[in-house]
Image (cartoon, rainbow, N blue to C red):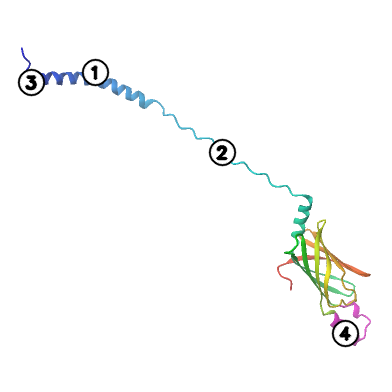
Amino acid sequence: MPISDKQRKLIWAGAALIGIFYVAPWAIHNARIASSQPVAEAKPSPVQYAPVAPKPVQTPEEVLNTQVARMAGDWQGSGVLDGGPCRLSLQIRPDPLKPAAYTGYATTACNPTFMTLGQDKQKAMQTILKGATPTSDIMSGEASKGNLVFHIVTAIGTPLDGCPWTGLTVSPFGGQVAVVWTAGTCAGGQMVLNRVNNVQ
């Protein structure tokens, strides 16, 4: 007996329903299992650090030169010398043409109060006027064992005691500097100076 088109369609529809009935639960079950499994997290790659270059080690001479370089700048101080109270201003500048070399500019002004004792009025006035005239020195120096040792290049004016400087040594003294000067066969002197913004 031949199968009509309508019967054929009914057979295919029935087969499809049977397939859905048996296959669908299996597919749903597998999907649930897959969704319940934890997803493996991607592990971050280890961080790569660039090697740090070691700091260069300074030689003892370089350490001392660095110490001397910190003394460049403007300094000022005051103290009582043989003739009376005096003020010393010092400028230290690196020499651009010579490594570890410096140029110094020093100016000293004094009030010769002690030297006028026992003098008559006219002599005392002359002493005061002479002492009121500052004396200056242009110096050239180099680093030596953590200090700056200057020699006099040009002297401007004559000190009240008649003894011009012949040399000056500058040493670090905490946040200050200590200066010691020589004056040939005369007695020298010393003073502690403070850093200032500008020498006046």
Q: Does the magenta stretch include residue 169?
A: no
Q: Does label 1 or label 3 sit earlier along the sequence?
A: 3
Q: What residue is shown at x 62% (from left), y 41% (from top)?
A: 51
Q: What residue is shown at x 24% (from left), y 18% (from top)?
A: 22
Look at mark 4 in the image and give the residue it sits on.
126
Residue 179: name its quadrant: bottom right
Q: Does label 3 or label 4 sit earlier along the sequence?
A: 3
Q: Is residue 23 left or right of residue 144?
A: left
**Which residue type carries mark 3?**
Asp
Which secondary structure lies at badge 3? helix
Q: Does label 1 or label 2 sit earlier along the sequence?
A: 1
Query: How far, Cα to Cα, is label 1 from label 3?
Result: 26 Å
Look at mark 3 in the image and give the residue it sits on.
5
- Of the 4 image quadrants, the one containing the N terminus is top left
Would you call the spot at circle 3 few (<14 residues within 10 Å), some (14-19), or many (20 or more)? few
- The answer to the question of whether label 1 and label 3 lie on touching residues, with beta carbons closer than 8 A, is no
Q: Choose mark 2 or mark 4, whichever is in front.
A: 2
Q: Does the magenta stretch include residue 128?
A: yes
Query: How far, Cα to Cα, is label 4 from label 1?
Result: 130 Å
Q: Secondary structure of the magenta portion, mostly?
A: helix
**Which residue type carries mark 1?**
Tyr
Q: Does label 4 or label 1 sit earlier along the sequence?
A: 1
Range of magenta residues: 112-130
Q: Choose mark 3 or mark 4, whichever is in front.
A: 3
> Image height check: is 40 above or below 116?
above
Q: Choose mark 1 or mark 2, whichever is in front.
A: 2
